Image (cartoon, rainbow, N blue to C red):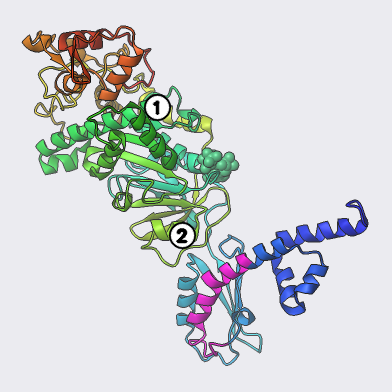
Amino acid sequence: MPTCRSPLAFRCRRRLGGVWENPDPAIAAAQTGGIGLVSAAAVGGAVYGLATRKRREFMREWVTPLHEALAVPLGMSELTDPCRYLHVPRNFSDDDAEIRIDVPAHMRFNEDLVVDLIVKKLALENVSFTWRRAGKDTHVIVKKRQAPPKMLRLTDPGVREILAKMPESAPLIGFGAGKKKVSVDLDADSPHVLISAGTGGGKSTILRTICCQFIHNGAHAYVLDFKRISHTWARGVPGVTYCRDIAEIHDALIRLAQEGRRRLSLAEQLADDVLEREPWRVGPRLVILLEEVNATMAQLKRHWAKIREPGDPKESPAIDALAEILFMGRQVRLHVLLVAQSATARAIGGPEMRENFATRILVRYTLNAWRMLVPEVSPIPMPSDHNGRVQVVTRGRAQETQVLNLSNEEAREWAMSGVHSKGTTGPSLYKPPAPAAPADDFADAWSTSASELPPAPATEPPASHRDLAAEASVLTSSPAAVAPAADVPDTAAATLPAPPAPADDDQALGLREAYDNHLSEIVASLDALRRARHDDPEFPAPVGKRGAAFLYRVGDLKKWARNRPRAAPGTTDLD
Ligand SMILES: Nc1ncnc2c1ncn2[C@@H]1O[C@H](COP(=O)(O)OP(=O)(O)OP(=O)(O)O)[C@@H](O)[C@H]1O
């Protein structure tokens, strides 16, 4: 018996490897010479099975439909074997690929129609057609005319300048064919962006590229990343709140939805033309990076199941909050950049939720993923394996794009070199208790309240001023979270009158009631309050019980909430 070191075994292994790399010749051999021949050449059954499956899929999805469209216009029998005249390589979407179609020598067909059908059936963009009409060997060669660049870096000539000139609402994603700039305009196209890619497909790179440009222009970013390490570039960058664990993410989503509601009521009070002209008046742009939505949703559900109490709704309020944010229009300037490895409708909260993402970026997609996410674009462009090559779909049009590849250092530098570089800091998590505001109003230093609109400047302030507006929009609310940094305008904290001690401080209430009526301005969420009851030794003792629920003196809770130790500035604890 030959050992695995024998020359025969070595040759078999080599041949097997070759077949794996390029199965077509082996399949062709199998088809003409029979499977026995291939077996004799040591092609394992598994390899053969895999290769033929891929080939069948390729034939079914691309070659056969092309044949069905072309045969009649070319004046050929529909029974012709498509492989005899359609030479479509499996990698036909690659930049250097070449498609050859043999056509009848009589040339009595409509060339324009044939061209149109080839483009449509193979979902080609920017291709050239070279006809050979003379002689017997009549054919047409189809090649990409202009492909996106193979790689796009910040250091490439002119890229830095282009980035600097992109509109504030429309960061550059990358370049398409012919160096065409591809961007997503959150004001004009789509308030939210969906990124669908398998692992290693370049999700983090896309987010990094988009997000650092928003921060550069004065937006605040909320990175909801329970993997903790997806965006190390953003750590400590002014304007970034990094929520790493699921409790933080839960609270952040609830807070952000509250902020959205506050902005909606503010927007309602602004005349339409003012809102149109000065959209920043509802607050700075808030960009929410939601990494790995499939896993995050599952974690949010589990988290809620752990902390929810009798009487609480069954559904996670954080998931509801996300849905609410996604349904809010562009006027509130809350934008979700959502990443999904497999963006099933269920993973993102139902099929109607998907409709909120007018812009979808797909990378290394399966045909099923495409059909589910972009049913309006057909035929489906062939996915590319090229690093950083994606399809950006907006308004029913897919654009093949090479994503700008920023390193962590470059993204960080870009984020910090914009409006945030002018000596200001990121969003303060401080919100003063504001007893005058309605309980559900997300009162903050910038807006004071929905009814007290800031004076309207005649035009949008320059970027250097926008950041001050951004600064002043204090997003999250708890005094326990972060003390305002010294350079953050803290006018509201300084000028708001101390709340009068209301007579109802002596009431004994359950936590939910106390939160809803008295603490929602001071504590980030009911969950945060509940967690504190378990974790904080300083949490007030209950003063009674109603059924199974403990009752607390409202004044004690308020005092506790006001006096909790504050986290260090720059931390991201939202409660
Ligand atoms: N635009 C790009 N240009 C060139 N290469 C890229 C680009 N985007 C991604 N890559 C390559 O792909 C690799 C993976 O990218 P990235 O980390 O963004 O993927 P990911 O989908 O976030 O990965 P994971 O699922 O592991 O978090 C990068 O290290 C890089 O080599």
- Kindly identify the residue that appears in the image at 46 percent across and 77 percent down: 117
Question: Element at badge 1?
Answer: strand
Question: Element at badge 2?
Answer: helix
Residue 265, visible in the rendered structure:
yes
Q: Quadrant of the C terminus?
A: top left
Bounds of the magenta span? 53-79
- Kindly identify the residue that appears in the image at 74 percent across and 79 percent down: 32
Between the C-alphas of marks 2 and 1, the distance is 32 Å
Q: Amino acid at mark 1?
A: Cys
* Location of residue 167 (image quadrant): top left
Camera-side residue of 361 and 178: 361
Position in image of residue 365 (x %, y %): 50, 55
Q: Which mark is residue 243?
A: 1
Callout 2 crowding tier (Cα within 10 Å): few <14, some 14–19, many ≥20: few
* Location of residue 307 (image quadrant): top left
Q: Quadrant of ligand 1?
A: top right
Contact (Cβ within 8 Å) of mark 2 with mark 1: no
Position in image of residue 277 (x %, y %): 18, 41
Camera-side residue of 523 and 4: 4
* Tag 2 residue: 368
